């Protein structure tokens, strides 16, 4: 029987922080990871570009036998997911699904905040889309959500500059900004899958008592729940414990940095996608 892995997509490394938690919660399934490192970052790209790149990746996953693809990237979830779900999926196959990370996070984020004041830190694209404001309002209408784009943070992570004075400067800048917007914030959501790599620097610049939340475990729990509720999808996911990694960038470079995100060493293969889908 052909393998039917669960596809996990990100613009680069960040989705590995999600895959790490998903494989811990659901180790039995097969997983196929693709990082579009050659075209990262997505955070400052326009809607149409992020949509075209993401759709191209989704098609590739389906061609590899996946029925279920998770966009483990907030920017792609914000800018491409809805259009893909509404316009493209109906033409791509009745048994195909694409899920994102914004909805599952919005469904629970209010429970992390005793006072109902949440700060969302993300890429320019995620913040501009307003997706977290809209989604969180549906589930927690009483929660006050403030947002801050942190355009330098993905570059700091992709370039391994976690513990530098430069990282400290830009992390402090944006945490100070968001706390000025709402001094009552008690929960900061890292709404970008790259940001957990800056956790030490973020915590060092966050006042005591503020909860810093990353998405890996949230998305993993949501997938556990989804597979339980959708046996028709669950049966399409093969279970041999396979993990396969692809990058559109340099595979050696990807492998050298990936373990920081994934917590284990990996060996990836290079994938060439048409540059202008
Ligand atoms: N990891 C992506 C996210 O979660 C952002 C990285 C990028 O800008 O490409 O938003």
Image (spheres, rainbow, N blue to C red):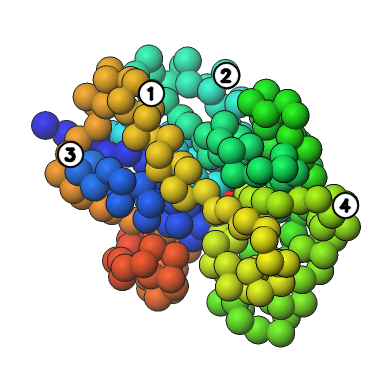
Q: Earlier in the sequence, mark 2 or mark 3?
A: 2
In the image, farthest residue toward the right: 180
Residue drawn 38% across and 23% down?
96
Query: Which dot marks residue 138?
Result: none
Badge nearest the viewer, 4 or 2: 4
In the image, farthest residue toward the bottom: 165
Residue under circle 4?
181
Badge nearest the viewer, 1 or 4: 4
Query: Which dot marks residue 96?
Result: 1
Residue under circle 2?
87
Q: Is residue 103 left or right of residue 172?
A: left
Secondary structure at numbered mark 3: loop
Q: Nearer the viewer, residue 72 or 4?
A: 72
Q: Residues within 10 Å of mark 4 (few under 14, many from 20)?
A: some
In the image, farthest residue toward the left: 1
Q: Is residue 214 depicted above or below 50 in this figure?
A: below
Q: Residues within 10 Å of mark 1 (few under 14, many from 20)?
A: some
Q: Earlier in the sequence, mark 1 or mark 4?
A: 1
Q: Position of residue 189 (x, y in %)?
A: 64, 50
Say if residue 34 shows up in the picture: no
């Amino acid at each position: 029987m052909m393998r039917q892995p669960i596809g996990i997509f990100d613009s680069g490394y960040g989705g590995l922080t999600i895959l790490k938690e998903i494989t811990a919660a659901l180790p039995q399934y097969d997983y196929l990871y693709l990082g579009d490192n050659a075209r990262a970052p997505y955070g400052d790209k326009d809607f149409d570009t992020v949509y075209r790149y993401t759709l191209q990746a989704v098609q590739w996953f389906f061609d590899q036998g996946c029925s279920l693809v998770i966009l483990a990237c907030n920017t792609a979830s914000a800018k491409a997911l809805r259009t893909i779900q509404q316009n493209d999926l109906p033409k791509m196959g009745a048994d195909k699904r694409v899920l994102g990370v914004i909805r599952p996070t919005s469904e629970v984020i209010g429970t992390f905040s005793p006072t109902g004041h949440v700060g969302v830190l993300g890429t320019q694209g995620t913040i501009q889309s307003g997706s977290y404001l809209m989604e969180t309002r549906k589930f927690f209408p009483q929660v006050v959500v403030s947002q801050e784009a942190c355009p330098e943070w993905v570059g700091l992570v992709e370039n391994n500059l976690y513990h530098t004075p430069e990282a400290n400067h830009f992390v402090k800048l944006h945490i100070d900004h968001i706390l000025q917007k709402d001094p009552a914030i008690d929960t900061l959501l890292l709404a970008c899958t790259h940001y957990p790599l800056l956790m030490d620097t973020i915590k060092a610049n966050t006042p005591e008592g503020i909860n810093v939340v990353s998405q890996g475990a949230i998305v993993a729990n949501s997938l556990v729940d989804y597979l339980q509720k959708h046996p028709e999808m669950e049966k399409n996911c093969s279970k041999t414990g396979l993990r396969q990694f692809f990058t559109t960038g340099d595979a050696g470079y990807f492998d050298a940095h990936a373990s920081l995100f994934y917590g284990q060493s990996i060996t990836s293969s290079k994938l060439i996608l048409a540059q202008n889908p």
